[in-house]
Image: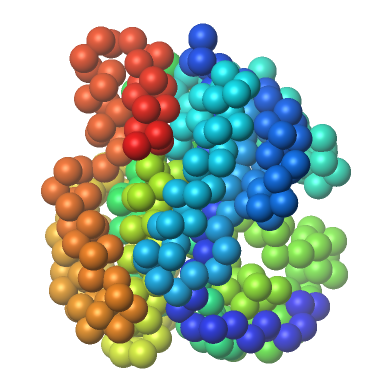
Amino acid sequence: MLGKFKDSDSYTMGVELELQLINNKTFDLTQTSPQVLEVLWQNSFAKKHYTPEMTESMIEINTSVHLSYSGLLAELHKIRSTLLTACDEMNIGVAGGGTHPFQCWTEQSIFDKQRYKDLYQRYGYLAKRFTVFGQHVHIGCSSGDDALYLLHALNRFVPQFIALSSSSPFGRGVDTFFDSSRLNSVFAFPLSGHAPFILEWDTFDREYFSKMEQTGTIHSMKDFYWDVRPKPEFGTIELRVCDTPLTVEKAAVIAVYLQVLCKYLLEEREYLPAKDDYLVYSYNRFQACRFGLDGEIVHPKTFEKTLLRDDIMATIDKLEKHAIDLNALDALQKVIQFIAEDNDANYLREKFSISEKIEDVVKASINKFRQ
């Protein structure tokens, strides 16, 4: 059993970004995370901000807990600068983006950590194919019941975050026609998708998690690859659908948009989640992955069809009061700007169209991350 949900300050947030390590000559991924981490971990600041991921061409950066947009962005800048300094000395490029445009999963090496080795034994080639790169956002909740309410209330808005963050149009050197092809790798895992519709923490813990634990198929919340999952040891919910954006600035804006939306959902309680909401969940998620901001989603209660870019704008109109409370109006204005500019997936397609060289897509990603 999971036990008590840790008390956490509501609407605090933290960000995790999985980043690509790039060979600056070939622009392919490079298996150098052990060496990069060895250098970084010599700095006491770095030990809690940089961690390994499934394969050795990945590195994860983690922020502290924040309430403000400005504080989160400032720390992301500092974490990025420290990482770039270390990688520059080793002639290694760093990039965001949900997938590397032409890497081959068979060439990837599992990081030397027991959990990753166990996952490789359990999932086989899926573990190496999981060399994809996402942004995870944690939002603090004051109770387990609030966490589960938020988790299910957010189901209606999950496609918005997929569309805003989409940055994985290429795979194996070709355009996949998906704005977020990364999520197709996640969907392959048996415990992906969405959480069961349970709104009370005690019920979730005693009647669902404990039974799953008894089956031997899971041992902790880490074994669930849900789009949104509770993290009782942190006192948060964790949104996991976002591709890693090309810049830390965009990552901060996406996190704050989620923060303000969660405040609105919890305090207004206008949107009451129901089990039937999930009837259109997979369809809406596919639309966001395939078409990004131009995806057409179905509202789970009214069945009205709306373009995602319009749905986000309509949502922002409801959030002003809560954004003011959180000093987040600047971040919401950035969301509007992102919609006007379109997402990172189409930025990468534009870069490819200029030279039709897939390596130039990687170069553009490296340069964008340094901004």
The residue at 40%/34% (across/down) is 370
For the question of whether residue 370 can be seen, the reply is: yes
Q: Nearer the viewer, residue 245 or 171?
A: 245
Say left or right for 245 vs 115: left
Say left or right for 39 vs 256: right
Q: Residue 152 at what x, y percent from top left?
A: 46, 75
The residue at 85%/43% (across/down) is 114
Quarter where residue 35 is shown: top right
Q: Is residue 261 above or below residue 61?
A: below
For the question of whether residue 199 can be seen, the reply is: no
The residue at 74%/31% (across/down) is 34
Q: Nearer the viewer, residue 48 or 245?
A: 48
In which quadrant is the N terminus drawn?
bottom right
Say left or right for 41 vs 359: right
Q: Is residue 289 above or below residue 152?
A: above
The residue at 81%/68% (across/down) is 213
Q: Is residue 16 above or below residue 290?
A: below
In which quadrant is the C terminus drawn?
top left
